[in-house]
Every structure is written in structure tokens, then in C-alpha cells.
């Protein structure tokens, strides 16, 4: 029996992601469609991804089903007698899973024991020490390791640059109201987007102060005369004295600055930098005073009519998405406490689980998690690119370890949820 069979794209795989590369199994462009495989344990992957995985491991990356030495799908000229002979001599001709480092999945030349309670020793020394730089738990059983760390490791832990979360909370298993727990989490991570007239006035005041300070320091563009300075001061006074509704003030601002200069050094760039700090406007987190192609294109789009298309009068219900990061044990504990389920539904089939919670003001929070996160050395942008919140779950050490593995995140708020022991 081969480790997998090649299948055609179908409705069964349309909404699924390959849990190795985390990309969709289906491509919008038919010419870019990758081959899809179904393993003998009924999980789906891109053929290229599972082939790469099986070069290093003989187990399914989701359920750990062993494929023995069946690492490749037989070709058309497959010889069953040769295959059976290889199966019988697998231990003699190839290294098994027990001879691979559990961290890098490469063959072991000698074993290194990290002195966990279960005495696991299937690591390269370099891999184990790298692991222990950021976590004091065994990567297999998650138990505390007793091995004394070298002095350089202590310094690295102290200097480890782990971004602070926007919100920390503890998950109390005795509190029955889970809706309140998630409501508080959402309120802290992505506050309600109510925009007031005072928000707009303060944004214009801040933009004007920053613009005038920039001009006064003699940086950047040489200004002849005081046209720009007078324009900024007059506009600040005009908005500060505005007594209409918030939506009317917003339309007036958008229509007025549409006719102002749009250079990276212009007053309008400082206004956009102030507006991006108002959550309800949902402007991209860019420095609009830069002169890169991306920033220039976005600056011209907003000033050319994009701002006036933002309707701040309507407060619509939000459909928020969150990605949950944590090891399998933590995910099961989180699901059991929050939803009274022993395991996230879908873990044993697709390797992906989702759960939706209804919140106040018709807001909805949909949480998604994936199996096998212990094997991810880093969490890259494709994993969380569609999320408005990143939720980390675990104990204190695990939370810091997870946070240190998130890459290229400059806009998605991160929440730490400390689980009970």
C-alpha cells in the first residue's frame, strides 16, 4: 500500500488547506493548481509538500500514523516483489523514525539527553541546546527539563526580544461565562470602532503639530515661504471650531485635503499618519511620509477619494477572525474549558478546527487552529494573514516561546491566554 493516492480537486477539498505549507489546496488559477494527495489515514496535502515531509519522516504530520517505508507513491512500473522486499528489509536499509532527531528530523549520529522526567534523548546536542534557549520544556512530553543550561543561554533568555502582547489574561476553569471571557478579550485586542468628533479634532491637531515640528527642524524638503505652514494652521483652527456632526466633519476633511499637495513631505502625509491611529478608519499601518512606491500609491488612493468612501456613520456588526497558537495539549485543554469538548472538532480528520462565538452588538468571533504546531519553528504571515487577532495559549514559558516564533507581524494584535496548570 502506498502512503498516499493522488486525487482530483473536489468539493471535499475546496475549503481545505494543506497543513504543511498552510496554503489552500485549490488554486484560483487552474494553471497553478498543485497536485493533491490523500494519505492512507485520510488527510489531504499538496503532493510536493508531503513528498518533502516523507523524505524526513515516516509518520503523518497530523495524526502520526506510521507509513513504514512507504515514502513515495509507486509509479506505473511499480514492482510489487521489490516493494515487499524493501518493506521486509526496511530496518536494515534505512534509518527509522527512532533514529531521527525529533527537532530537525535528520539522522542521529549520537544521542543527547536533555534530562526530562521521561529521559528523552532523541536529539542532536545542538538542536536540543537551541530549543532550550527559548523553552525549558521537553519538545516531546512538554515536561520541565532539569539540565543546567550554560551561562550563555541565561544571557540569551534575558535578551530575548519577545514582543509584549496587547492584552494578557488567565483562563479560569471555574468561571462559566465564556462569552464574557471572549468579549473582554475582543474589547482589549480590537476595541469597538466608535469614532467621535473629538477623535477627528485631536487627529488634526496632532498632525499639525508634527508637520510644523518637522518643518522647523529643517529636515527634508526646502520650503519657500509659509504657504504650507499657513495652510496647516488655518485648517487646524477650522476643524477645532467645527460644531457639526462627526460624519459631516469627516466628509469636510476628506473633501478639503483632497486638493492639498500629496508629496511624502506634505501636510496631508502627516494627517494620514494621525488617521491611521484611529481604529475605526482601518487605514493601513504605513508611514505615509515615506516615498516608496507602495506608500505613494496608497497615499494617492486615500487622498484621491479613498477617505471620502469611508462611511463612519454606520456601525456595522463585525465578523472577527482569530488564529489560536499553542501545542496540542494546550489546544485540547483550551477547547475543553471553553467549549466543553475533549478535542477541537476536525483535528483527527482535516487537522483544522474552528469555533464561532456570538458577542455583543451582533459581533462574531471565529477562532481557527491547526494541529501539529509543535513542529513549526516559526509562524509566518500566511498562517495569520486573514486574522484580526492572534491568541497564544499555554503557560508562561510556552507563551514566550510562541511569541518569539511569530514572524513579520506589524499590525495584528497578539493576546496571551495563560492556561491553568
Image (cartoon, grey):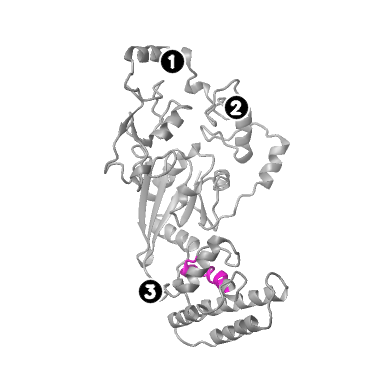
In the depicted view, which residue is nearer to us: 82 or 29?
29
The image shows a total of numbered marks equal to: 3
Q: Earlier in the sequence, mark 3 or mark 1?
A: 1
Tag 2's secondary structure? loop
The answer to the question of whether label 2 and label 1 lie on touching residues, with beta carbons closer than 8 A, is: no
Check disc 2: other Cα within 10 Å, few if <14, some if 14-19, many if 20+: many
Q: Residue at x 61, y 25 (%)?
A: 112
Residue 12: percent from the left, percent from the top? 28, 41
Q: Earlier in the sequence, mark 2 or mark 3?
A: 2
User: Taking 115 as reference, is 172 above or below it?
Assistant: below
The answer to the question of whether label 3 and label 1 lie on touching residues, with beta carbons closer than 8 A, is: no
Q: Is residue 334 left or right of residue 406?
A: left
Tag 1's secondary structure? helix
In the depicted view, which residue is nearer to us: 216 or 203?
216
The answer to the question of whether label 2 and label 3 lie on touching residues, with beta carbons closer than 8 A, is: no
Residue 374: percent from the left, percent from the top? 49, 38
Residue 314, label in figure: 3
Residue on which the image places disc 1: 90
Q: Of discs 2 and 1, which sits in the foreground?
A: 1
Residue on which the image places disc 2: 124
Q: Residue at x 37, y 69 (%)?
A: 316
Q: Quadrant of the N terminus?
A: top left
Distance from Cα at disc 2 to Cα at disc 3: 58 Å
Residue 420, label in figure: none
Check disc 1: other Cα within 10 Å, few if <14, some if 14-19, many if 20+: some
Amino acid at each position: 500500500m502506498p502512503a498516499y493516492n493522488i486525487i482530483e480537486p473536489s468539493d471535499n477539498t475546496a475549503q481545505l488547506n494543506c497543513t504543511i505549507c498552510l496554503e489552500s489546496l485549490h488554486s484560483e488559477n487552474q494553471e497553478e493548481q498543485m497536485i493533491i494527495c490523500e494519505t492512507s489515514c485520510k488527510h489531504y496535502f499538496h503532493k510536493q509538500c508531503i513528498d518533502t515531509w516523507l523524505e524526513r519522516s515516516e509518520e503523518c504530520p497530523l495524526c502520526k500514523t506510521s507509513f513504514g517505508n512507504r515514502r513515495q507513491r509507486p509509479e506505473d512500473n511499480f514492482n510489487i516483489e521489490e516493494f515487499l522486499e524493501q518493506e521486509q528489509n526496511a530496518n536494515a536499509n534505512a534509518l527509522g523514525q527512532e533514529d531521527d532527531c525529533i527537532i530537525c528530523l535528520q539522522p542521529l549520529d549520537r544521542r543527547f539527553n536533555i534530562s526530562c522526567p521521561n529521559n528523552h534523548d532523541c536529539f542532536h546536542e545542538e538542536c536540543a541546546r537551541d530549543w532550550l534557549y527559548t523553552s525549558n520544556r521537553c519538545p516531546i512530553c512538554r515536561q520541565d527539563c532539569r539540565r543546567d543550561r550554560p551561562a550563555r543561554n541565561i544571557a540569551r533568555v534575558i535578551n530575548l526580544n519577545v514582543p509584549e502582547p496587547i492584552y494578557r489574561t488567565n483562563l479560569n476553569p471555574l468561571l462559566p461565562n465564556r462569552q464574557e471571557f471572549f468579549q473582554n478579550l475582543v474589547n482589549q485586542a480590537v476595541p469597538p470602532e466608535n469614532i467621535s468628533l473629538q477623535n477627528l479634532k485631536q487627529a488634526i491637531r496632532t498632525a499639525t503639530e508634527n508637520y510644523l515640528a518637522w518643518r522647523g527642524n529643517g529636515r527634508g524638503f526646502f520650503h519657500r515661504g509659509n504657504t504650507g505652514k499657513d495652510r496647516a494652521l488655518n485648517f487646524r483652527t477650522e476643524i477645532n471650531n467645527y460644531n457639526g456632526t462627526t460624519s459631516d466633519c469627516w466628509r469636510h476633511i476628506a473633501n478639503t485635503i483632497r486638493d492639498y499637495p500629496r508629496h511624502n513631505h506634505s501636510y496631508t502625509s502627516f494627517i494620514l499618519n494621525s488617521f491611521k491611529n484611529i481604529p475605526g478608519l482601518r487605514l493601513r499601518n504605513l508611514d505615509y511620509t515615506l516615498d516608496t512606491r507602495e506608500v505613494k500609491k496608497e497615499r494617492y488612493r486615500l487622498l484621491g477619494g479613498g477617505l471620502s468612501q469611508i462611511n463612519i456613520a454606520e456601525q456595522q456588526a463585525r465578523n472577527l477572525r482569530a488564529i489560536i497558537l499553542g501545542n496540542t495539549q494546550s489546544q485540547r485543554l483550551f477547547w475543553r474549558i471553553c467549549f466543553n469538548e475533549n478535542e477541537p472538532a476536525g483535528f483527527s480528520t482535516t487537522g483544522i478546527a474552528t469555533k464561532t462565538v456570538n458577542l455583543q452588538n451582533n459581533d462574531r468571533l471565529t477562532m481557527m487552529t491547526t494541529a501539529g504546531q509543535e513542529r513549526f519553528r516559526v509562524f509566518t504571515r500566511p498562517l495569520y494573514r486573514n486574522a484580526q487577532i492572534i491568541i497564544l495559549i499555554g503557560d508562561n514559558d510556552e507563551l514566550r516561546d510562541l511569541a518569539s516564533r511569530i514572524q513579520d507581524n506589524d499590525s495584528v494584535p497578539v493576546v496571551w491566554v495563560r492556561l491553568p496548570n
